[in-house]
Image (tube, grey):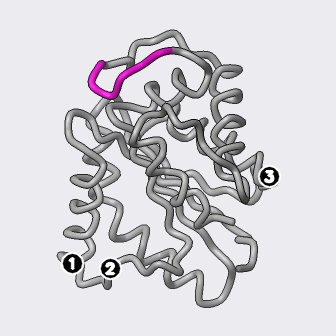
């Protein structure tokens, strides 16, 4: 696989974007290599915004990837649902837009934290968490996001073994992240 010359990030909010940016930095992408889809204005429903833009983002990825190595990272919380449910929503969105399903060879990665991105950040930085509690109001600064992204990067390296005690949505993201390499 060739390295992407552009990585597009479709994310719910600023914390999601920052986590992905920090992870991409570990993969040696610069800010110049990354395009962040504009976040929704105000404090609306970020997950709905991502779902509504998903098919168009995949279509744009496919069009650009025909002429230049491109990747797409989609970050959406599972909220009270589960990862599989979010993935089914994406499949349905593509079907409704008359787009083919995501192919295994496509550099389209889905990061779906359950319940929210803060769950991942806290877990990756050593805090005990569960995937049912809401950590969205936890105190999280830029250093904690950077450390969480570095830990996640370690999990995605060739031959790396994620910890045996983990959270399921984070483990599901490991093969997704490998789509970007």
Marker disc for residue 136 = none
Query: Badge 2 is on which residue?
Result: 101
Q: Main secondary structure of the magenta part?
A: loop
Query: Badge 1 is on which residue?
Result: 95
Question: Which segment is the magenta one?
Answer: 128-133
Up the image or down, 122 lies above or below 103; here it is above
Q: Is residue 45 left or right of residue 150?
A: left
Q: Secondary structure at mark 2?
A: loop
Task: Give the residue displayed 69% in from the left and 66% down from the top.
Answer: 181
Mark 2 / mark 3, whichever is N-terminal: 3
Up the image or down, 11 lies above or below 87; here it is above
Task: Give the residue displayed 43% in from the left and 34% down from the top.
Answer: 167
Task: Give the residue displayed 47% in from the left and 41% down from the top.
Answer: 170
Q: Nearer the viewer, residue 33 or 26?
A: 26
Distance between mark 3 and mark 1 Cα atoms? 33 Å
Q: Is residue 153 left or right of residue 110?
A: right
Q: Quadrant of residue 147?
A: top right
Total labels: the figure holds 3
Q: Secondary structure at mark 3?
A: loop
Q: Secondary structure at mark 1?
A: helix
Circle 2 residues within 10 Å: few <14, some 14–19, many ≥20 = few
Task: Give the residue displayed 81% in from the left and 54% down from the top.
Answer: 28
Q: Quadrant of the N terminus?
A: bottom right
In magenta stretch: residue 3: no
Circle 3 residues within 10 Å: few <14, some 14–19, many ≥20 = some
Residue 66 screen position, x and y as percent:
59, 89
Look at the numbered discs 2 and 3 and tell me whether their residues touch, using CB distance below 8 Å: no
Residue 92 screen position, x and y as percent:
19, 69
Look at the numbered discs 3 and 1 and tell me whether their residues touch, using CB distance below 8 Å: no
Look at the numbered discs 1 and 2 and tell me whether their residues touch, using CB distance below 8 Å: yes
């Amino acid at each position: 696989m060739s390295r992407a010359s552009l990585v597009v990030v479709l994310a719910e909010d600023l914390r999601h974007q920052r986590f992905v940016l920090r992870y991409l930095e570990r993969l040696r992408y610069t800010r110049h290599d990354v395009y962040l889809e504009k976040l929704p204005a105000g404090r609306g429903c970020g997950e709905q915004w991502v779902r509504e833009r998903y098919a168009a983002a995949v279509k744009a990825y496919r069009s650009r990837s025909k002429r230049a190595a491109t990747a797409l990272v989609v970050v959406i919380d599972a909220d009270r649902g589960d990862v599989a449910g979010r993935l089914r929503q994406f499949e349905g969105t593509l079907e409704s837009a008359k787009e083919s399903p995501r192919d295994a060879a496509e550099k389209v990665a889905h990061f779906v934290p359950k319940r929210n991105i803060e769950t991942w950040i806290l877990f990756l930085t050593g805090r005990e968490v569960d995937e049912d509690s809401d950590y969205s109001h936890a105190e999280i600064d830029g250093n904690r996001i950077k450390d969480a992204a570095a830990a996640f990067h370690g999990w995605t390296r060739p031959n790396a073994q994620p910890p045996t005690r983990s959270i399921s949505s984070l483990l599901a993201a490991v093969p997704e992240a490998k789509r970007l390499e």
